[in-house]
Structure formats: structure tokens, C-alpha cells
Image (cartoon, rainbow, N blue to C red):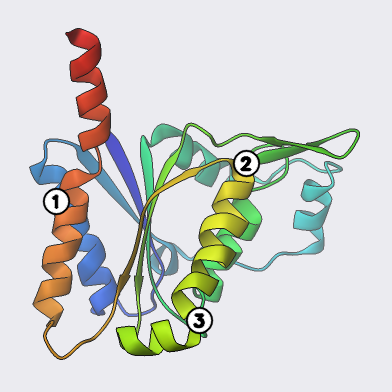
Amino acid sequence: MHALIVVAHPDPNSLTHAVADRLAEGVSKSGHAAEIADLMAEGFDPRFTATDHAVHLKRAAPSAEILAEQARIDRADTLVLVYPVYWWSMPGLLKGWIDRVFINGWAYDEVPGGKLEKKLGHLPVHLVALGGADQRTYERHGYSGAMRTQIDHGIFDYCGARIVTSEFLLPSDTQTMSAHLDTAQAIGGKLFQTAERGEAADAA
């Protein structure tokens, strides 16, 4: 099976990139394939323009760039987003990728009568966010819940995609960067366990 790991960070030597790499390593060691999509290195343009708005309204066709991103997701058996927490959300680069790629007609469909058709029910999603504040700060201000409402529910549930992992890797007195890397590898190693158990049950 194939995992698409999307990473959004400007520094290729960052902990975010190291986490994405170790997660991919975990996928590979479990016998599956992993592809890392480095949005910064690939030069993805996150700006939602008038053309994108026309596509949203179904008055224009998506560009080749957007169709290629959608095809990359369609080829994957699971989607993993790895990103730093900026202002208690994801970076603008990643949000712009979602704005431009998860469009009306592909990720969801606004049909006549105001009904919504969710089109990504087949796509398991794993979210791995790296924060600079500790767990106490997240709990005290409700940041974890707010981000899950905004991202897990507000974006992916709207499209019908199932959130399997929603992990915050945060600094603490007892954890080191190597612990975060170990966690990332463990997540990668478990991405397809549920699917494998289902296939085994079907075979039995």
C-alpha cells in the first residue's frame, strides 16, 4: 500500500522534515511504500486566486498543477500531513494547498438544494503537528480542541475523510527530539495495520 506524506516547512533540516522522514521510514519498514511531498521544495503556490474562485464555482476547469496534486492523492491509500503549528493552526503553505486542491467537485460536491456530497470517504488521514508550547499550555487554553475542531472536523470531516491519527508532538521536561522521531516512526509503522487486519479477516 502507498502513503502520501505531505510536509510543509521552509527548512529541510527542521525537526518537521526529520519527523516526516522517520514516518516514511516506519512505513517502508512495515512493507509499504511512502512518498514525501515537500510543498516548499516543489514550489507549490498557495495563493487562492480569482481563477481558483472560478474553479470553486465550477466556472473554470482546474489547472494541470491542481489536477496533478489530486491525482497524487488519488493514488495514495492514506494521506499524512506533517507540519509545524503556526499561530495555533497549520502553516499558510499547507492551508493554501488544501484551499486549492480540496475543491468543490473533487473533495466534496455542493449539489442543488443546498445538499453536500462528501467525496473523500475512502481516504484515511493522519495529522502530525509539531508545536513549540508544552502540553500544559495546550490544555490550559484549549488549543488542542480548537485545532481539532478547525482542522479535523472543519476540513476533513467536511469532505468525509476519516481522521485516524491526530497527534501533537510537543516539548516537555521528559521528552527529547529523538522521542518525537521514535513516535513518528511508530505512527508510520502502524498506518496500514487496520487495513491489513481487514484483509486477513476477509481471507479467513
Picture layout, residue 135 above or below residue 150: below
Residue at the spot 44% in from the left edge and 63% down from the top edge: 39
- In percent of width and height, residue 149 lies at 56, 64
Of pointers 1 and 3, the one earlier in the residue sequence? 1
Q: Residue at 17%, 8% (x, y): give it.
A: 204
Q: Where residue 113 sits in the image (x, y, percent)?
A: 91, 34
Q: Is residue 158 above or below residue 40?
A: above
Image point (76%, 40%), residue name: 61
Q: Nearer the viewer, residue 176 or 39?
A: 176
Which quadrant of the figure has residue 20? bottom left
**Circle number at residue 107:** 2
SS for callout 1: helix
| First of labels 2, 1 by sequence position | 1
Residue in the picture at 62% in, 58% down: 154
Callout 3: few (<14), some (14-19), or many (20+) C-alpha neighbours within 10 Å? few
Q: Amino acid at mark 1?
A: Gly
Q: Which residue is mark 1?
A: 26
**Mark 3 is on which residue type?**
Trp
| Nearest-to-viewer mark from 2 and 3 | 3
| Disc sitting over residue 88 in the figure | 3
Marks counted in the figure total: 3
State left or right for residue 172 relative to residue 92.
Answer: left
The quadrant holding residue 134 is bottom left
As measured in the structure, the alpha-carbon distance from the residue carrying label 2 to the one carrying label 1 is 28 Å
